[in-house]
Amino acid sequence: MAFTIDASSIVFKQTCRGINATAVILADGGKRVGEIHDVAEKIAADVKFVGADARDAFAAEARRLHPVVLGRADHSDDIFISEYARVLLADAEKLLLSELSSN
């Protein structure tokens, strides 16, 4: 299963410690499966899912695509989920910025 971030759903918020971002996570076919809340001062992003099946599928995909995170392969699923969601968020941010710059 492939996951993406809906670039149009990204919301940025400037804080005194950096920029926070919130966005919707989509599965194949555009089905909403979760949401990332990336807080600037937190080591791991908060990722919430619509159900346990969505979380399990996302964790499996994260471990498959990025088997080593922060130099280790023995983290809990939460770390793999956080880092994979951040990668997807960064990709969506690039897409959003390229769309804005071409307008």
Image (tube, rainbow, N blue to C red):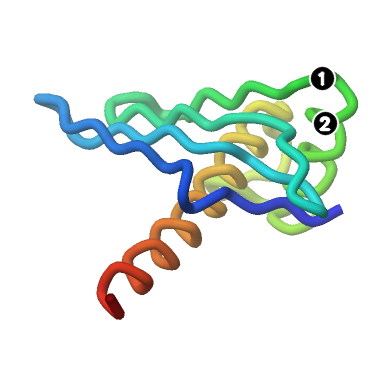
Q: Which residue lies at the image location 9% right of the left edge and 25% below the top edge?
A: 16
Question: Front-most of 69 and 40?
Answer: 40
Question: Front-most of 3 and 70?
Answer: 3
Q: Which residue lies at the image location 46% right of the left edge and 50% below the top edge?
A: 8
The amino acid marked with disc number 1 is Gly
The alpha-carbon separation of the residues under discs 2 and 1 comes to 5 Å
Q: Residues within 10 Å of mark 2 (few under 14, many from 20)?
A: some
* CB atoms of marks 2 and 1 within 8 Å: yes
Q: Position of residue 62 (x, y in %)?
A: 73, 47
Q: Position of residue 30 (x, y in %)?
A: 74, 49
Which residue was labeled with disc 1? Answer: 51
Left or right position of 43 against 12: right
Left or right position of 18 against 80: left
The amino acid marked with disc number 2 is Ala
Residue 50 shows in this picture: yes
Question: Front-most of 56 and 49?
Answer: 49
Left or right position of 41 against 64: left
Taking 34 as reference, is 90 above or below it?
Answer: below
Taking 22 as reference, is 85 above or below it?
Answer: below
Q: Secondary structure at mark 2?
A: helix
Question: Front-most of 32 and 76?
Answer: 32
Q: Position of residue 23 (x, y in %)?
A: 49, 37
Q: Secondary structure at mark 1?
A: loop
Taking 19 as reference, is 68 above or below it?
Answer: below
User: Residue 54 shows which numbered tag?
Assistant: 2
Q: Position of residue 5 (x, y in %)?
A: 58, 49
Q: How many numbered tags mark residues here?
A: 2
